[in-house]
Image (spheres, rainbow, N blue to C red):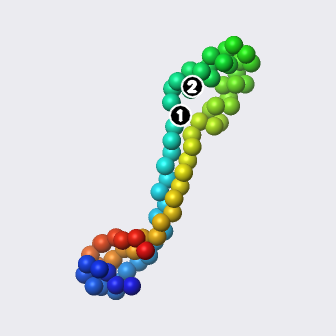
Amino acid sequence: MVCPRCKNSNVNIQVVTNVETKHRGCFRWLMWIILACLTLGLILLIIPLATNTKTKSKNKTVAICQNCGKRWNV
C-alpha cells in the first residue's frame, strides 16, 4: 500500500472503534421517581439505573502513513 500524499510505502493499518454513549433525559428520570414513590418504592428506582445508557460502537479500518502522518479509510 502506498501513501497518496508522499508516495511512501511505510503504511500501518489499524482498526479504530468509535463508541457513542447516549444518556436519557431528566424528564424520564422524573417520571420514574414519581412512579416509584406511588407504587413499589425503591425497586423501581433500581431498574432505570441499570438501563440508563445506550452504547453504540462502530469499527472502521484506517491506514496511517508512518512518514507524513496522513490517515485514510481502507
Picture coordinates of residue 72 (x, y %)? 36, 71
- Left or right of 70? Residue 14 is right
Q: Which mark is residue 24?
A: 1
Cα separation, mark 1 vs mark 2, equals: 8 Å
Q: Which mark is residue 29?
A: 2
Tags 1 and 2 in contact by the CB under 8 Å rule? yes
Say what amino acid the circle numbered 1 marks: Arg
Q: How many marks?
A: 2
Q: Residue at x 62, y 23 (%)?
A: 32
Q: Toward the viewer: 67 or 34? A: 34
Picture coordinates of residue 5 (x, y %)? 25, 78
- Looking at the image, residue 37 lies above or below residue 10: above
Q: Residues within 10 Å of mark 1 (few under 14, many from 20)?
A: few
Q: Residue at x 52, y 24 (%)?
A: 27
Q: Earlier in the sequence, mark 1 or mark 2?
A: 1
- Left or right of 10? Residue 41 is right
Helix, strand or loop for disc 1? loop
- Looking at the image, residue 48 lies above or below residue 40: below
Picture coordinates of residue 10 (x, y %)? 35, 83
- Looking at the image, residue 57 lies above or below residue 23: below
Q: Residues within 10 Å of mark 2 (few under 14, many from 20)?
A: some
- Looking at the image, residue 22 lies above or below residue 8: above
Q: Quadrant of residue 28?
A: top right
Q: Residue farthest to the top?
A: 38
Q: Quadrant of residue 50?
A: top right
Helix, strand or loop for disc 2? helix
Q: Quadrant of the N terminus?
A: bottom left
Q: Toward the viewer: 27 or 16? A: 27
Say what amino acid the circle numbered 2 marks: Trp
